[in-house]
Amino acid sequence: MTAPPEPKPKPASADTAPIQVCDLKAQYLAIEAEVRAALDRVLARSWFILGEELAAFEEEFAGFLGTPHAVGVASGTDAIHLALRALDIGAGDRVLTAPNSAVPTAAAIVAAGAVPCFADVDPFTGLLDPASVERHLDPGVKAIVPVHLYGRCVPMGAILDLGKRHGIPIVEDAAQAHGATWRGRAAGTMGVIGCFSFYPSKNLGACGDAGACTTADPTLAARLRRLRNYGERDRYLSVEFGINSRLDELQAAVLRVKLPHLAGWNARRREMAAVYRDRLASLPVVITAPTDDGEDVHHLFVARVARRDRLRGELQTRRVMTQVHYPLPIHLHPAYAHLGFGPGSFPVAERRAEQIVSLPLYPEMTAHQQERVIAAVAEALHGEEPPAQTRP
Ligand SMILES: Cc1ncc(COP(=O)(O)O)c(C=O)c1O
């Protein structure tokens, strides 16, 4: 007797296919011909480092932000590292940032030779709380790195004012905020240097690692160009210690294809965020209220719930994927324990880390997919209590 044939796996339908937090393949397919043409152009030219694609991208990205200079580097981490070095911040200096950022914000400070320190964040937005920044400033702090987390600008008025009063530069971490604005000013153009990541899943993402520094100061721009290229002033003449941190031609060409799409993609993210806000409003979940102080580019859509890990499990069984940005504040990572900030040092950031969950949101997500996420969240949260600190 022959065994009955194995049942063929059914292809996932629109109702059962997993919904990811971000779907890079969907973006690629939407612009495939343009990306391939750009890559072909670079390959045909076979000039791969510090060439015309990078120069053009730097000009186009600076133009998009409305700032005079953009300097392409190898990653967002290097952008922050080199920004600090360009400002002569290093050994013995402390640099204050947000404890709930991605670890690379602090790693870049360490790479520059400085020591990270932190202030607490707003319970509702997760952005640096200027009052806490002021409390944690002392003469050893030589720069502030506000992080425009999840695509929304930190309220920059108070931060810029603190920088001015204490005579210390503001270096913006705009890795998650390409195109976000605060009172009409673009993220990355308010401090003395802005730092961007073009990690593939960012609002503007390369097909690999890439980053940029932006500045209005031509002297700083020139120094950043040197620092990213072994400290060379002229070919084979290093006038200061520098590293290899260049944004290569293939990545620059891809970024040039994507940049003209960015405003539309950001607008689509805002539309989808408005739908989530509206449809999740009656559930035991806290969502940051919209800002009337600028434009949020919703790099991530982050909600807070009482039992986050339970919700994630329930959503996963419904094939709705989630992530947590970020599950452990930087000061509680083993690599940063030596800084001496134990549990309880930044209680708001620590509490948020237990409650936050990032729901799927990317420009190519369909209305049907979003409906599936909303229905799954509603089912999963049925009978749940709202999280602590629910007042927006
Ligand atoms: C807020 C923030 N800062 C810095 C970085 C570092 O960027 P990269 O991964 O390009 O080094 C990232 C991205 O991972 C980020 O999200």
Image (cartoon, rainbow, N blue to C red):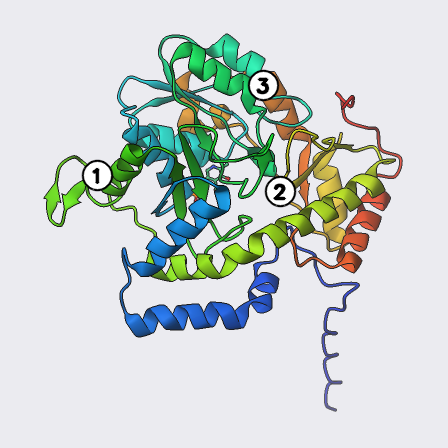
Question: Residue at left 76%, top 24%?
Answer: 392
Give the Cα separation between the discs numbered 1 and 2. Answer: 33 Å
Disc count in the image? 3
Residue 385, picture quadrant: top right
The residue type indicated by label 2 comes to Val
Residue matched to label 3 = 129
Query: Which mark is nearer the camera, 1 or 2?
Result: 2
The residue type indicated by label 3 comes to Asp
Residue 45: x percent and y percent? Answer: 29, 71
**What label sits on residue 297 in the rendered view?**
2
Q: Is residue 10 left or right of residue 198?
A: right
Q: Is residue 321 left or right of residue 371?
A: left
The residue type indicated by label 1 comes to Gly
Task: From this view, report whether residue 99 is shown above or below residue 174.
Answer: above
The local crowd at label 3, few if under 14, some if 14 to 19, many if 20 or more residues have their Cα within 10 Å, is many
Q: Are marks 3 and 2 in contact (CB under 8 Å)?
A: no
The local crowd at label 1, few if under 14, some if 14 to 19, many if 20 or more residues have their Cα within 10 Å, is some
Residue 279: x percent and y percent? Answer: 84, 43
**Helix, strand or loop for disc 1:** loop
**N-term-proximal mark, 1 vs 3:** 3
Residue matched to label 1 = 242
Q: Is mark 2 within 8 Å of ligand 1?
A: no
Give the Cα separation between the discs numbered 3 and 2. Answer: 20 Å
Q: Is mark 1 within 8 Å of ligand 1?
A: no
Task: From this view, report whether residue 22 is shown above or below residue 147.
Answer: below
Instruction: Tell me the quadrant of the picture where the N terminus can be found.
Output: bottom right
Residue 255, picture quadrant: bottom left
